Amino acid sequence: MPTVEPRAVARHRAGGPRTLPADAERWPDAAAVPRASWPVRAVTEAVVGRALRRLPLRVRFADGTTLGPGGPLIEVRDPKAFHARIGTRGLIGFGESYMAGEWDAPDLVGALTVLAAHAADLIPPRLQRLRGAWAQRQPDAQRNTPDGSRTNISRHYDLSNDLFALFLDETLTYSSAVFRGFPADWSLLAAAQHRKIDRLLELAGVGGGTRLLEIGTGWGELALRAAARGAHVTSLTLSKEQRELALERVREAGYADRVAIELCDYREARGTYDAVVSVEMIEAVGVEFWPVYFHTLDERLTPGGRVALQAITMPHERMLAARDTYTWIQKYVFPGGLIPSTTAIEQAVRDHTGLAVAARDGFGAHYAETLRLWRERFTGQADEVAALGFDATFGRLWSFYLAYSEAGFRSGYLDVQQYLFTKENPAR
């Protein structure tokens, strides 16, 4: 384990410019720069320099040195800290260096899109083969056991309903919208979210009298629209904050007799339903529990029923490389999370259920646009975020998270799918 030194001391040693102070109690790994030995720094500088020289970027260091043939600008304000973090913590260190203000980019999404597009070849093949020796492993504390899932979900979704309301539209929908065209305007986001929800409800065949199970409530918009169609909805969530607000919205809409929102793990669900819908919840399940998750979808569905699933996906070979690695997103945003591939989803359905894949539709460009609107809204309300008690390091963390996610979809590294799974009715 590398030792660390306070950032003020690290800046003095490096002779670098002043960067952002981080609260050492709240952000210990952003507030302190890891001590990296000379060989580690030298190898890191060589590997990072090799990668940056080949990419369509322009990287400017504090001493005026530049790398890259041209493209979006990355400004490295504290090169010693930047290389020390990457050398000791890899991509986690890259994100922490941004949180600490040691590097920045006028067009952050543009710069991250270039990096995402070349994610598979940033590290030389010989070093990639040694990944298991240097990459951090996911901590056991973030395993998505029933208790672990409650803790993991709470760390993100129980931050503050008011925080999410600052950058989500009035539907409070925290998943990809479906637009009619690009570029999209903020005023069109709520309608685009309803379009997405309605597509899922149509896929699942939800109408009057349908018994619907929703796994992952969010703030209740899908349950409300299903109830408006005459469905009877049981919705499951592990977030106390989300449940409280979703129940309030259900009561205000007059659907308390049609919508039940339970603080319940998907593994604890009971009963059978005509349809099941789950929107961008599989990413929080973890590879270890994907078989259980899909078996639950099957077990809770009546013969002849339909499952509509929305899932973020990544290429299968990248998923295999990442599934045991601890990432910046897991450390700071979605503990225990892992994005599946379409191959992994379809293998789990085939191997652990009696369901059939009836349809699949990808629309990653729509997620990039959704994230752009969220990011612009979030960064434009820094004072409001601060007024809720979130500090400047949190603001940089979340700006990076939203930009990093948008870049994943703009580069094609990430996609989002809507699936329809069906269950044969042997009685017919």
Image (cartoon, rainbow, N blue to C red):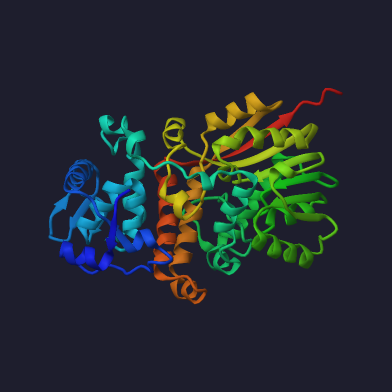
Q: In this rendering, is residue 58 above or below 416?
A: below
Q: To which quarter of the image does residue 254 belong? A: bottom right
Q: Residue at x 57, y 49 (%)?
A: 178
Measured as percent of width and height from the top left, residue 342 is found at 54, 32
Image quarter hosting the C terminus: top right
- Give 292 or 77, whichever is nearer the viewer: 292
Measured as percent of width and height from the top left, residue 39 is found at 17, 44
Q: Residue at x 28, y 30 (%)?
A: 125
Residue 228 in view of the camera? no
Measured as percent of width and height from the top left, residue 397 is found at 41, 60
Q: To which quarter of the image does residue 224 belong? A: bottom right
Q: To which quarter of the image does residue 253 belong? A: bottom right
- Give 239 or 175, whichever is nearer the viewer: 239
The number of numbered badges drawn on the structure is: 0
Measured as percent of width and height from the top left, residue 232 is found at 82, 50
Q: In this rendering, is residue 42 above or below 98?
A: above
Q: Residue at x 20, y 56 (%)?
A: 80
- Residue 206 relative to residue 102: left or right: right
Residue 143 in view of the camera? yes
- Residue 316 relative to residue 260: left or right: left
